[in-house]
Structures are given as C-alpha cells and as structure tokens.
Image (spheres, rainbow, N blue to C red):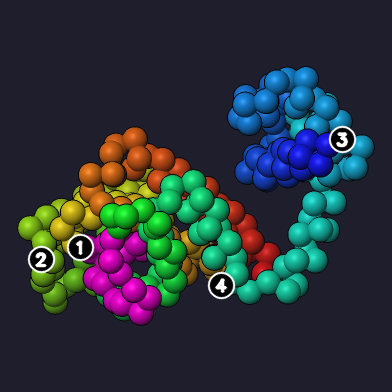
Amino acid sequence: MTEAANRTLQRGLTILELLSEHPDGLELHEIANELSLPKSSAHNLMQTLLTLRYVRLTAAGRYQMTLKTFEVGAAVVQTTDVTQVLRQYMQQAFADCNETMHCGVLSGKEVLYIDKIESTQSIRMASHVGIRMPLYATAMGKAFLAEMSNDDVRRLYADDTLSPLTSRTITDVEALIAQLASIRERGWAMEDQENADNVSCVGVAILGRDGRPAYALSISAPSFRMTPEQLENCGALLRRAKRRIERVLRAL
C-alpha cells in the first residue's frame, strides 16, 4: 500500500514538473503519452490535482498549473541560494546519464570550473573544481560564446591566436564562429576531443535575471560512449536543466 501510494505521489509530482515546461498547458492524451501512463491513470491523477487546485482545466481542454504551485514554490525561493539550485538540477540530469557533470562561470576568456559531479563508471574523465579552460576548446566555453554576437567573438580574439590543446582543437576564429551558429540553432554546444584526447562534452549556458550568461553546465564522457544518440540525449537533459534553472533564477 505504501509503495503504491509513493508511486502515485511520484507520478503526480512528475506531472507538475511536466506542466511547468508547458505554460500553455497539455491535453490529457499528451500528458499520458509524455509519461507513458494509461489514459485512465492519467485521468485519475489529473482529477486529484484539480481537486487540490494545483491545476486547472481550460475551456480548450488543456491542463495548466495554477497560482497555488507558485505559492508553494515562493516559500522555497525565500531560503534558496543559487548554488543549491544549480546542484539540484545537475543531480537530476546526472541521475539520467551517470556521466561526469561540471558547472562553470565565465572568467575573461576562460571557463572557471566551480562544481563537479563525478561519474561512477570505471572509465571517466579526470578533472577538478578550480581549473580554468579556454572558451574556444570546451563545450561550456562555446555555450558562453554562442550567447555573444559574432562581432563580439571576433573582438574577444582580435589579438590572440587559438592555441591547439589537441589535434582537433579549432584554431581559426571564423571556423569557431561557424560552429557557434550551429550551437545557437541546436540549443547546446559540444566539443569532440578538442580539450582532451578521447573525451567529448556537451554544454549549455544558463542565463541570469539580466538575460546574460551567468553559468554553464556540461556533461563529459569518454568519446566512445558519446554516440550520436547519447549526444542528443545529453543535449536534451541539459536543455531541460537550463529551462528549470533559469525559471528559478528569474524568481530569486
């Protein structure tokens, strides 16, 4: 009985998380499909959330979150700092990939690594909090650069050469700018053995309340595990974390 009750609670909270990413709401069949639930189970859960006034049903038949969820969340925001927010959503993404995760901040032409969750897999990348790496050769760094204009990137490296860290490092500013266009379109950055041999990374920039990049997150793994499918999966995990973190940062 307790296990079933816990599963019901988990599903209800997962529905609220799903709706938080869809301000316009979702129809019942969309919720059921997204969470792989029988339509009858999804209906019962939504009826409970309606009764408790955590969601409402629009005239168009879409379920949306209500201000009651804001009231609950606002109580937490009052006692939350940014590092807690970043670590919480890093842990959520890590739980779905078990690959090494980093958090970094922009520091001139470098990324300063400020947090890390290490993979438990036997083969994993080596790194440590406190290191600095060049923007042009890391996924987090490229995510930061993608938030700049092309002209700003050119000015940033006007007097510099892009020194190779490996044989794959991009050393031409215009080639880097071409890659940034793809990053902006895709929504996440990647580097394939450009910072260290046999290591590939995916990254996103986190925008602060002022709309400027404040933090970045990355997932790093041995290149043989970063298949095209895994790259897409990691990109999706980071984009989801980005949306959730930015939502909280706007409220702090």
Looking at numbered disc 2 in the image, what kind of residue is underneath it? Pro
Decide which of tag 3 and tag 4 comes sooner along the chain: 3
Decide which of tag 4 and tag 1 comes sooner along the chain: 4
Q: CA distance from mark 4 to mark 1?
A: 26 Å
* Residue at (68% x, 42% y) in the render: 14
Q: CA distance from mark 1 to mark 2?
A: 8 Å
Q: Position of residue 16 (x, y in %)?
A: 72, 43
Decide which of tag 2 and tag 3 comes sooner along the chain: 3
The answer to whether the residues at label 1 and label 2 have Cβ atoms under 8 Å apart is: no
> Is residue 181 rendered to the left or right of residue 214?
left
**Can you name the residue that lies furthest to the left here?**
167
Q: Which mark is residue 195?
A: 1
Front label number (4 vs 2): 4
Q: Position of residue 137 (x, y in %)?
A: 22, 63
Q: Which mark is residue 83?
A: 4
Front label number (2 vs 3): 3
Decide which of tag 1 and tag 2 comes sooner along the chain: 2
Q: Which mark is residue 249?
A: none
> Is residue 160 rendered to the left or right of residue 20?
left
Callout 4: 10 Å neighbours few (<14), some, many (20+)? few
Chain part drawn in magenta: 125-148
